[in-house]
Amino acid sequence: MRRILLLALPFAAPTFAANAPGPGPAPAGPGGPSISIEEFDPKSTLRVPEHKPTRAKFPFIDVHTHHRDVTPARLDQLIKDMDSLNMGLMINSPVGGGQGKWVADAAAASKAHSPARFRVMTNMDQSKLEEPDYGARAAAQLETDIKAGAIGLKVWKGFGMTLQDSQGRIKVDDPRFDPVWAMAGKHKIPVLIHTADPWGLFQPMDKNNERWLELKIQARRNQSAQTNYTWEQLIDEQHRLFARHPQTTFIAAHLGWLGHDLGKLGALLDRLPNVHVEIGAITSELGRAPRAAHRFFVKYQDRVLFGKDAYNVAEYHVYFRLLETDDEYFDPIRKYHGIWKLYGLALPDDVLKKLYYKNALKLFPGLPSAGFPQ
């Protein structure tokens, strides 16, 4: 499909230069007016059956979502949203600095408002990293947060990429954090960890990079231009971390950024039974390989959880369509994640139930099971 698009757009090739002009009128060429790839938005003439579910087929648990505001008014609105989507339970995690008081307050507020609908995760204390007692102190803070109501540990993507000490970048598998992972294992809470970003964002911004448009629109994501480490280094560090802590349950966020290589991801899951994955922000990866993705979800149906990440009610609808239907050639959530259309995976009901809620009920301690079909 991608090849066909490029063949249909010989006039767009000049925009794939580093100094290409932005969107706007361009002079007409021999074949007519020229447009940029940002402007190109063809309307498909394909006529095939369409299904656009706005509610999930089964109640689901979102394990990857971020809400700082936990006031009663905001929770009221979230409940309305959740009911419209058939979201049974939301596991809320802060993106940074959410340990300590925030967790205790958020857990208390959620319990007072709707104890069956909300749970919270915590973050890792990353202060005073070079002090000798750092590991013990951070682990103790995690234990305090668990006792205050946290049911998981969310590790933000700065861990491994931007987190530094006086010696430079701190690696994902740095041993000073071992007491934290051990504490999570002791209390049997999962660690939802985001490491790196999509592979293409670490590659040169040239005509061969399928993430070219994202790099053009989101220049800050151009890791090849601003980092001195590779995607492979980060992912290898993460996998070594998983292997070194077999008693700790890890959930690799965003399919561990291996949605483009499900064979490698499957090999990781085969090798490390303590590793699970969630599907936030990777619908474009799955939707371009529906048969391979279908086989992956069936084979690893006990290891994949539902997560959305960025909160947007309408965008959940694309997830439902991708997972539940066999629709063909429909629009992705974001064009710049890949200039291609999506195809539905048509997952069977038993797989959907595990993805939507059964796997989360197994991994996260103390979740209420009422309202979720057996």
Image: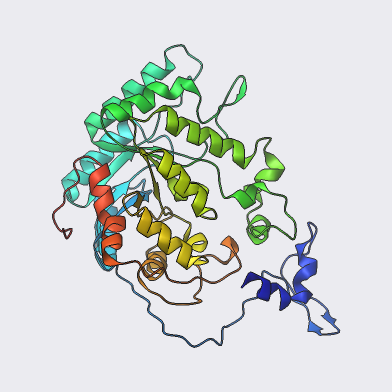
Q: Is residue 71 left or right of residue 284?
A: left
- How many numbered marks does the figure carry? 0
Question: What residue occupies the far left of the structure in this picture?
Answer: 370
Q: Is residue 211 left or right of residue 133?
A: right
Question: What residue occupies the far right of the structure in this picture?
Answer: 30
Closer-to-camera residue (76/142): 142
Query: Which residue lies at the image location 66% right of the left edge and 48% below the top edge?
Result: 222
Query: Which residue lies at the image location 32% right of the left edge and 46% below the top edge?
Result: 92
Q: Is residue 30 left or right of residue 274?
A: right
Would residue 129 be seen by someone viewing this image from the given angle? yes
How far across and down, in percent of the image, does residue 157 sit?
Answer: 50, 40
In the image, residue 57 above or below residue 87? below
How far across and down, in percent of the image, does residue 62 sit?
Answer: 32, 53
Query: Which residue lies at the image location 46% right of the left edge and 85% below the top edge?
Result: 48
Closer-to-camera residue (243/115): 243
Q: Which quadrant would the N terminus be assigned to in this image?
A: bottom right
Would residue 258 be seen by someone viewing this image from the given angle? no
In the image, residue 219 above or below residue 94? below
In the image, residue 343 above or below residue 221? below
Query: Which residue lies at the image location 66% right of the left edge and 52% below the top edge?
Result: 219
How far across and down, in percent of the image, does residue 214 sit?
Answer: 63, 58
Q: Which quadrant would the C terminus be assigned to in this image?
A: bottom left
Closer-to-camera residue (13/291): 291
Closer-to-camera residue (136/75): 136
**Colouring used for the render:** rainbow
